[in-house]
Structures are given as structure tokens and as C-alpha cells.
Image (cartoon, rainbow, N blue to C red):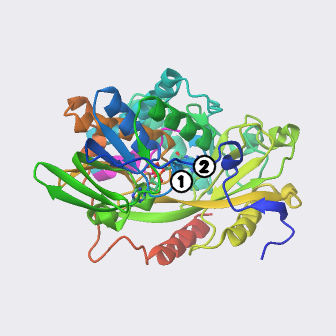
Amino acid sequence: MAGDIFADGWKATPYWWDLAPRPDWPSVDLPAEVDVAIVGSGYAGMSCALHLARAGRNVIILEAKEPGHGASSRSGGMAGSGLKLGYADLKAKYGQQRAVDLILETERSLEFFEEFMAGEQIQCHYQKVGRFIGAHAPSHYEAMARGIDEVKKEVGIDTGYMVPRAEQGSEIKTDLYYGGKVTGSGGGLHPAVYHQGVLDRVKAAGIPVAGHTPVTAIAREGEGFEVTTTRGKIKARNVAVMTNGYTPSAAQDLRRRLVPVGSYIIATEDIGEEKVTELFPNHRMIADTKAILYYYRPSPDRKRIIFGGRAKTRDVETAESGRILHKFMCGVFPELQDVKVTHSWTGNVAFAFDKLPHIGERDGIHYALACNGSGVVKQTYLGMKTALSIMGDPEGRTAFHDLEFTTIPFYDGNPWFLPIVQRWYQWRDARAR
Ligand SMILES: Cc1cc2nc3c(=O)[nH]c(=O)nc-3n(C[C@H](O)[C@H](O)[C@H](O)COP(=O)(O)OP(=O)(O)OC[C@H]3O[C@@H](n4cnc5c(N)ncnc54)[C@H](O)[C@@H]3O)c2cc1C
């Protein structure tokens, strides 16, 4: 299947794992009882565990595979404060006050995230380069410009500035967009090194991480829960489900509120810092306004391009997705036709039906789920907030707690409708131009 767009010896594993391989995890004896059992060892689970353990709680992290196997070591590493819905959509749906609260909550998530990394001294190639969002259509450009003004006026924060099409070469060497928006905050990091950094802090805090220990059932028992894993049972006063796009049937009531979606990425061969700088003059993270968007960026060493998106309406092998994403990338930068792909991989994100993050408690089980494609910052933040909620601290409350976590009738967590929805979005994207 693989042809000449692939470099010899290309890998179907994340580029990030070359520098931060998945840890070879020693097996951990399961304790009979803990204060809190956390399911999932991504950013959310580890952040939650760390904040609980530091407050004196006895915690265990249960992970189906090796630590960080999920999205947290696979992502594009783009760190920002945005939500999938813009301020105007939020206001139309929830009214002005709640829209303001939601926007301010995401702003706080980025502040927390940067403070957390600095406080923990996690060196993960974080570069505060901001983001450029390319307008897929002239109307999208106008909408983004209106959004900046509206947020400035009604929320009181500055979310960026517009760059017209005639000047977009200062941001990106492509003619594809009708100008775009620059967001100065946030930037990019190495997601697997970030994950490893948090995992090191978790280890230092003495928190056991039981890898290769999938949770198969969670049942109420007295005041707490009995958590069943393939390696035995644990009694826990509280349980936090932090499994996002990999949420298992053991948490079926949450799983049926999430739509897992495979996202695909490639890394190119080393094309040199000079070429990367020519294509990305400010080395920013890039996304666009399509419903089925592209997201891409320079690698942290600025020598490669990391390019992601949804390759097809159905899930595909990484050889096929690599080929498709290479084509998409050449649609942005036609001059990259001869550039080879060295890594092609995939991972799951989780969408909620309202496309917003969800945190809270259902039947006594705590959760922070539904990253909607952006969870580097927010899942770290919501993991911390979940820890505070478990400890009964009112500071654990967020604007996201007020959102209803809905599902649709007969949906069991298997998104059979995804190809149809994606075709609809693709049609809308094509029609917008
Ligand atoms: C390809 C891709 C690109 C992305 N790009 C970006 C980006 O550029 N910027 C951004 O902000 N976000 C991005 N994201 C999203 C971001 O990576 C996620 O939102 C974030 O990592 C989710 O963290 P988490 O801790 O909630 O879940 P995860 O990191 O997915 O962890 C969940 C864990 O739960 C475990 N698990 C599942 N079932 C069980 C079970 N039964 N028992 C025990 N453990 C279980 C899984 O094995 C997994 O390790 C991307 C995601 C993907 C997949």
C-alpha cells in the first residue's frame, strides 16, 4: 500500500514517540482499597491524581495499556484556550452571561496550564508562538473579525487580530486562505514529552500507575465503589473516569454521551529550518475554519511539518491516511510534493453532542470528558478541577458544570452515523467557498 510518498522505514507510530517512547511499565500490585481510583492515564487522569495525592489522598491510576497510550502522547501538541463553539454561537445558545463565563473559563485554563508547567518545571519544548486560523471562505474571515470585536466589547478580552489575504504571506506561505486570525496566546509543545513530564511528577508523588490494567466494571458498593479490572478488584471511595475518546463500556452511561472520532497525523522528513521558516514565518500553530479542519505546525525543532486532520469519512489504516494527509498538505503547500512522510499515526478525540467540554458527576462517578479535538490545555485543567470537586472544594466548580451532558436515543457509543455527518460537513465546507 505504501508508495513513494513514504520515506524508507517510515513508522506507523507517533513522531513524538521517537523522543519520548511509551514507558515500559513495571506491573503494580493492586491495593485492596484506595480513596480515589482514576481510570485513564492521559493528561486529565494524571493531573487529577497529582492534585489529589498532594492533598493527602490515597490514589491509584488504572490504565488499559501503557501510560499515555491514548490521545495525550499522540496529539498535534497545539496548546490554546479556544472552544469549538465561538462566542456568538455560545451566546445564541446559552445567553450572554453564560457565554461570557464559558469564554473566561477557557482563558483561565490556559493561565493555569502555563503556571502548572512552570511550577512543575516541565520542559516540553513549549513555544509561545500563538496560532493562525486561516479563513476557508470570505464569510468566515468576516465572522472571525466580528468575533474579535464582540469578545473585546462584551467579554473584555483581546483574542487576536485579523490578517487580510493580501498580507497572509507574513503568517503562512499559501494562497489557500482568505486571510485569517492571529491569536497571540498559547503555542505548541511536544505532547509526549509533556506527558512524560507529568508522569514523572506523578511517580515522584508516589502515585501507583497500574498499566495494562483495563477497568471492566464500576459498581456501587456502600458509600463507595467496587472497581473491577482484569487484574483484580479495588474498593474506592471515589472514582474518576478520564478516558475521553477511549471511554469503555465499563462506563457506559458516559460512553453513550461521547462520539469518539479518529484523528490522523503525519510528520514529514527533515526539510531544514530555513524551509520551515519560509513556510511558517512566525512558526505559529495553524488551523482553519473548515468543519473538517486541517491542523498543522512546525515540529518543535522547526525542521519538519506535523500535519493533521480527518483523512476519510471512515477510519482507515495509517498507510492510507498518510497518503491522504500528504495530499492535503500539498494542497496547502504545493511545493512539498516530493517531501516524504516519516511517520503516520492516529488517535481518538471525543466530541460531546454540544461540542463543549464536560466535567461533573453522574451516579457518583466523577468525569472530565469531551475534548472536542483540543485537550492539551483543557484536560490538564479539568483534571485539576475534578480533583478539587472530589475533595469537596467549591473551587472545583467551573462554567462547564452547568452544561447538560446529553446523548441521543438508542446511541451506545458506537458512532455509526459519523460518515454521514462528515459528508454533510464536507458539503458545507465545499459550499462555503
Ligand atoms: C491525533 C490527535 C491530535 C490532537 N491534536 C491536539 C492538539 O493539537 N491540541 C490539543 O489541545 N488537543 C489535541 N488533541 C486532543 C488531546 O490530545 C486530548 O484531548 C487529550 O490528550 C485527552 O486527554 P485525556 O487524558 O482526557 O485522554 P487520553 O489521553 O485519551 O487518555 C485516556 C486513557 O484512558 C485509557 N483507557 C481507556 N479505557 C480504559 C479502561 N477500561 N481502563 C483503564 N484505562 C482505560 C486509554 O488507554 C487512554 O490512555 C489531539 C488528539 C488526537 C488523537
Most distant residue in the front direction: 29
Residue at figure coordinates x 10%, y 52% from the top left: 222
Magenta region: which residues? 80-93
Q: Is residue 298 above or below residue 211?
A: above
Q: Which residue is mark 2?
A: 22
- Residue labelled 1 has its Cβ within 8 Å of some atom of ligand 1: yes
Q: Identify the mark nearer the N-term, 2 or 1.
A: 2
Q: In the rendering, at what x and y percent does residue 286 appear?
A: 65, 46
CB within 8 Å, label 2 to label 1: yes
Callout 2: SS: loop
Query: Which amino acid does the dot numbered 2 rest on?
Result: Arg
Label 1 element class: loop
From the viewer's perspective, tell me whether residue 78 is left or right of residue 252: right
Q: Quadrant of residue 150?
A: top left
How crowded pointer 1 is (Cα within 10 Å; few <14, some 14-19, many 20+) is rated as some
88 falls in the magenta region: yes
Q: Is residue 156 left or right of residue 200?
A: left
Q: Which residue in the protein does label 1 denote?
A: 69
| Of 242 and 101, the residue lying toward us | 242
Q: Is residue 291 visible?
A: yes
Left or right position of 143 against 369? right
Single out the residue that lies furthest toward the left: 222
The quarter of the rendered structure image containing the C terminus is: bottom right
Residue 59 in picture, x, y percent from top left: 32, 39
> Is any part of residue 103 visible from this angle?
no
